[in-house]
Amino acid sequence: MWIAQLSDPHLRPRGTLYKDMTDSNAMFAAAIEQIKVLEPSPDLVLLTGDIVDEGEPSEYRTASELLAAIKAPLRIIPGNHDERSVLRATFREHAYLPSSGPLNYVDDLSGPVRIVALDVSVPVFHHGHVDDDSLGWLDKVLGSDPSRPTLIMMHQPPFACGVPYLDEYCCRGGDRLAAVIARYPAVERIVCGHVHRHMQLRFAGTLLCTAPSTTTAIALRPYPTAKPACFIEPPGFLLHHWKPDTGLLTHSIPIGSFPGPFPFA
Ligand SMILES: [Fe+2]
């Protein structure tokens, strides 16, 4: 089972740049084109939040138009820049999205890996939070089939990386989340977005990784006096490959056209 993960495209109305700086719409279109020519084709595409930048309907129209090019099943969660009600209205044909409250859901039909989407976004705030209801829901879902290989996706990661302007907005309640997940060894991976960088660490006995953005990279400045900044670095996405004998293997792939292929021997 091949699972492509796109994150943080921060789409804008047609013809509008992201932060007056870069064409996030064109960069997302390029990411989708790259996913479309992957061999083998992904069985599932995940989009881990900040689909748009300001939560505006015109931005979601861009999202809807661009995402129509993805033929594989698509599973989305909101980020801190999304607006749940507009997202729901735009993606109303995504029947897996609950009609009210946080967009928590389970996809256990798309393949051998069960996908658990945990919506930790807090409307109008940038940090994330795992509340009691979502924790209880997660515990029940994981406990319903505890041996099933599982990937959990959420937007804000539940750890502090040392970059002050990222840590201010991480997902709060990480200790309580870890206490639940640690009880379920079949959780193969937790995948997040939000930090616009690829990071990985052990969390609750499993592996947690964050995806780069398909547009800008947030500056890696891990010291207390750091000033917030971003760079237009090579964008990227993650590709998770499940095999029963190896488990889940994650590739980090830059988006773009590169010289090659060349002979390799
Ligand atoms: Fe973002």
Image: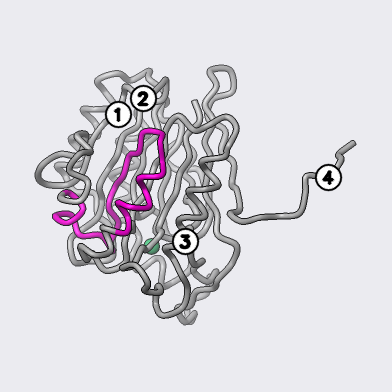
Instruction: Tell which tag, 3 or 2, sits nearer the viewer.
Output: 2
Label 3 residue SS: loop
CA distance for labels 3 and 2: 27 Å
| Mark whose residue sits in front, 1 or 4 | 4
The residue under label 2 is 110
State the residue at coordinates (66%, 55%): 257
Q: Quick one: label 1 or label 4, which is nearer the N terminus?
A: 1
Image quadrant in which the C terminus is located: top right
Quarter, ligand 1: bottom left
Residue pictured at 20% horizontal, 58% vertical? 122
Is residue 221 or residue 178 the one in the foreground? Answer: 221
**Beta carbon at label 3 within 8 Å of ligand 1:** yes
Residue 223 percent location from the top left of the image:
52, 74
Which residue corresponds to mark 3?
A: 196
Q: CA distance from mark 1 to mark 4?
A: 40 Å
Decide whether residue 81 is among the magenta residues: yes
Residue for badge 4: 262
Percent of width and height locating residue 202: 50, 43
User: Which residues fall within the magenta stretch?
Assistant: 62-88
